[in-house]
Image: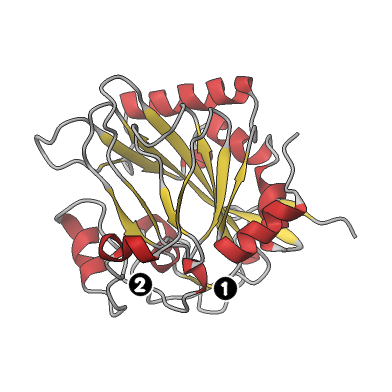
């Protein structure tokens, strides 16, 4: 079973990102990859096509699959992901926040913009992380995510970046009172930007405030299917009035509420031994 070594926990604290090899086994990878393919073949109402009309390839996303599909639920309840998240965040308990598909098919030039995850969410607290699971071989050619090491400690929350132009979300994010994020490409030479080659079943664990983005999938043949498992720790509290995903707003919590008020949406997945 994959574990968080002391060096991994220290890397997460310092850099905002750590790598865990072999987080899930081959059987679970096949199960999750098949679930992603089902979601792509018959998109749910909440699914998103990030490509512009007529753009080459396909960049597909979906969210909250665990509530309707037992295979995505298994990613939370039948893998060590939550325990590793607890170790990384140094949290005594870990709650499921939500899950998300990011799949870039071959020859998809659409980039993932530089962004932090945290400003999209109606929450306060520092203990939020993502366990990002590779379901295909991932490297530079087919769009490996890049992480700006240490950016989770810059002390700023930046305006959410639209993943696609137009639509309600793009306008809401653009109108956010937060300052725009820095021009990472212009600063690239002065930054510590990490990129990891991942085998199926490997994962990165990264902080909710870490700046990250990804190029398109330049491979003519290789897919890039990934599953993002979002987790919340002990200090997570709700915050109303933040521009965010429609589905999260429907939780109808009040500012300052702990997530345990809605165990149906945010169940406890792991607790440290007393």
Towards the viewer: 132 or 263:
132
- Say the numbered circle drawn on residue 27: none
Quadrant location of residue 225? top left
Category of crowding for the residue at label 1, using alpha-carbon neighbours closer than 10 angstroms: few (below 14), some (14–19), many (at least 20): some
Residue 237 against residue 68 in the figure, above or below = below
Q: Secondary structure at mark 1?
A: loop
Q: Is residue 199 left or right of residue 261?
A: left
Residue 34 against residue 198 in the figure, above or below = above
- Say the numbered circle drawn on residue 158: 2
Residue at mark 1 to residue at mark 2: CA–CA distance: 16 Å
Q: Residue at x 30, y 19 (%)?
A: 221
User: Given the current orientation, which residue lies at the most extreme left position?
Assistant: 54
Name the residue carrying label 1: 125
**How many marks do you count on the picture?**
2
Q: Is residue 97 left or right of residue 249?
A: right
Residue 51 against residue 129 in the figure, above or below = above
Camera-near label (1 vs 2) is 2
Position of the C terminus, as image quadrant, is bottom right
Towards the viewer: 29 or 218:
218
Residue 223 location, x and y as percent? 36, 26
Towards the viewer: 1 or 100:
1
């Amino acid at each position: 079973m994959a574990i968080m070594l002391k060096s991994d926990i220290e890397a997460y604290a310092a850099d905002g990102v750590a790598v865990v090899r072999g987080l899930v086994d081959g059987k679970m990878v096949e199960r999750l990859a098949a679930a992603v393919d089902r979601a792509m073949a018959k998109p749910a109402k909440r699914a998103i096509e990030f490509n512009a009309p007529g753009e080459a390839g396909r960049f597909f996303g979906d969210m909250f699959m665990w509530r309707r599909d037992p295979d995505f639920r298994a990613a939370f309840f039948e893998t060590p992901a939550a325990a590793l998240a607890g170790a990384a965040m140094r949290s005594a308990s870990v709650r499921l926040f939500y899950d998300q598909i990011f799949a870039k098919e071959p020859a998809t030039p659409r980039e993932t913009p530089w962004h932090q995850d945290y400003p999209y969410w109606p929450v306060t607290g520092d203990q939020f992380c993502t366990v990002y699971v590779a379901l295909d071989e991932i490297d530079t050619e087919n769009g490996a995510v890049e992480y700006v090491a240490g950016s989770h400690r810059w002390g700023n929350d930046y305006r959410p970046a639209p993943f696609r132009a137009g639509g309600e979300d793009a306008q809401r994010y653009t109108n956010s009172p937060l300052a725009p994020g820095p021009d990472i490409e212009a600063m690239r030479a002065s930054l510590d930007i990490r990129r990891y080659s991942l085998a199926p079943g490997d994962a990165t664990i990264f902080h909710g405030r870490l700046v990250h983005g990804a190029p398109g999938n330049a491979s003519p043949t290789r897919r890039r299917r990934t599953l993002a498992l979002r987790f919340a720790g002990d200090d997570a509290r709700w915050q109303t009035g933040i521009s965010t995903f429609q589905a999260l707003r429907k939780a109808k919590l009040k500012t300052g509420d702990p997530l345990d008020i809605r165990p149906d949406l945010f169940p406890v997945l792991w607790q440290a031994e007393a």
